[in-house]
Image (cartoon, rainbow, N blue to C red):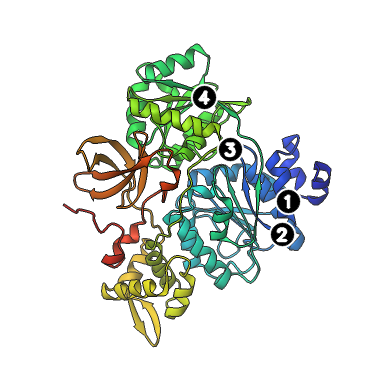
Amino acid sequence: MNEAEIKKLLKRAYGPFFGSFGRLTHIQSALIPPLVKGKNAVGVSPAASGKTEAALGPIAERVLTIGVKPLSILYVAPTRALINDIEKRIREPLASLGLSLSVRTGDRPELRTTRPENVLLTTPESLDSLFCRHPRIWKDTRAVILDEIHLLDNTYRGDQLRILLRRLEKWHTENPIQYCALSSTISQPENLAGRYFESATVVKAGTTREISFHLFPDMERVIQFLRQNKYHKALIFCNSRKNVEELALRLKTFWPQDRVLVHHGSLSRKERESVEDAMRTWQWGLCVCTMTMELGIDIGDIDAVVLYGPPPTPSAFIQRVGRGGRRGNEMLAIGCYRNKRDERVQFEIYSRMAEKGLVERIEYTPDISVCVQQVFSLLYAMPGGLRWDDMGDILSPLCETDTFKAILLHLADIGFVEESLGRCRATTRLMDMAYMGFIHSNIPQIRDFRIVDANTGRVIGELFIEAAVGSHFVLSGKVWQVLQVKRKQKTLIVGQVGPLDTLARFTRRYSYGAFSRYLPKELRPSAKIDSS
């Protein structure tokens, strides 16, 4: 379908959403037609290709045709920083169409629950809270957009979102829902889509730009390279907040102090937004960050991306590299392997995979800790109680009937649920947790861990990760599995699974959810955790 035909399809939405583009991008031309016809879709395209507009434009057009209602469109994104950035891009186009927008996150509880806006931007955890506290405001919801879905899928957050969408369809809305999922790095989009909605049209468009990749053993040489080539503005990715803070201090010894910024999830919303605003307006400067800047937050044109140590996965490498050099056809990336041969090898493997367009294939494994979290959420939302079978049906994508019953009996034994008149109800203990807002997030504490090879006793390195027995990660050019967690010693005992290019051996990207501690002992993935 050519651009003139798409303009006719988007009689009202084309100008506000695409008028400033000059011409449609590849993903926009490919994704708009199925969405404007009401089909479910997955859009896969490189970073900065206009995926947000490609999804929201045609869906807004459909909503205007059907009839605008409160909460017509639900837009779910993985981080508050990304939500803030998306808001800046879409508020004006929506307003020009007469559509109101609200944001609901831990930082910004702005939704008018008495007279909700037409479009809501939120995270899975805030959506969970809204379902519990305001279950009747969703009856007119028509569409759901899932942005950067690869960061949620195959994690406890993605599984929580799966159940929330089932709750939306079964109990909260009166309409069939149209879905669109967006990502720049998915190895199996058809399988991913099937976990969240049915009958998805997969749309892949746009080509990844070539990567100009350079390697250096220390940051002094990295800075020298930037200066020699007149690269004035750079993002520097670290794998931990600790590394971010330490590196930023060191950079200030040979780079102007007022031109070194820090960005990570521990900073306040106001501080993060100040950094983002500065990077948008600066012509030169450095921003040292964690994965918080992976997600396409608008900080203007970036000359180069520096990776301070290799990321944990090939897809994270592609995501970070994709943030740089957007003005040209080439992405400039620099790896700092910190005088470690293993890191240099890992960087070389990642860059070869990126050239071939390869990312890790991750075998999906449901996280049953989400069953506990959702039992808590469901029973808080329905003080009158729920039948076992109704809860079991909602949670069926994550666990079988026997597993669900074992979980529920255990929760009764430890004082969270009780049975009355054939229904399962929350106890006072559970309701007290819910009133304090402790039941909606399944995100565990992330810490720095020393990594020790179980076979040799050798310390391999340190990582800032979520830790659970059975989880996998990449370090020193190899894939490792966590065998034991020693929390007090901040140590992970690991065993090598295979070389980095053994992609099938990745089983999940992150560890298990925080509610794992409430599972029966025999179902607990962290059964081998040493509390000493």
N-terminal label among 3 and 2: 2
Q: Is the residue under label 3 in contact with that under label 4 (CB below 8 Å)?
A: no
Q: Position of residue 10 (x, y in %)?
A: 78, 50
Badge number at residue 47: 3
Residue at the disc numbered 2: 38
Please tell me which residue is depicted at 38% across the width and 36% down the height of the picture: 239
N-terminal label among 1 and 2: 2
Q: Is the residue under label 4 in contact with that under label 1 (CB below 8 Å)?
A: no
Residue 98 appears anywhere in the view: no
Q: Position of residue 150 (x, y in %)?
A: 51, 48
Q: CA distance from mark 2 to mark 4?
A: 39 Å
Residue at the disc numbered 4: 304
Closer to the eye: label 3 or 1:
3
| Residue in the foreground of this view, choosing between 467 and 356 | 356
Q: CA distance from mark 3 to mark 2?
A: 25 Å
| Three-letter code for the amino acid on which mark 1 is drawn | Leu
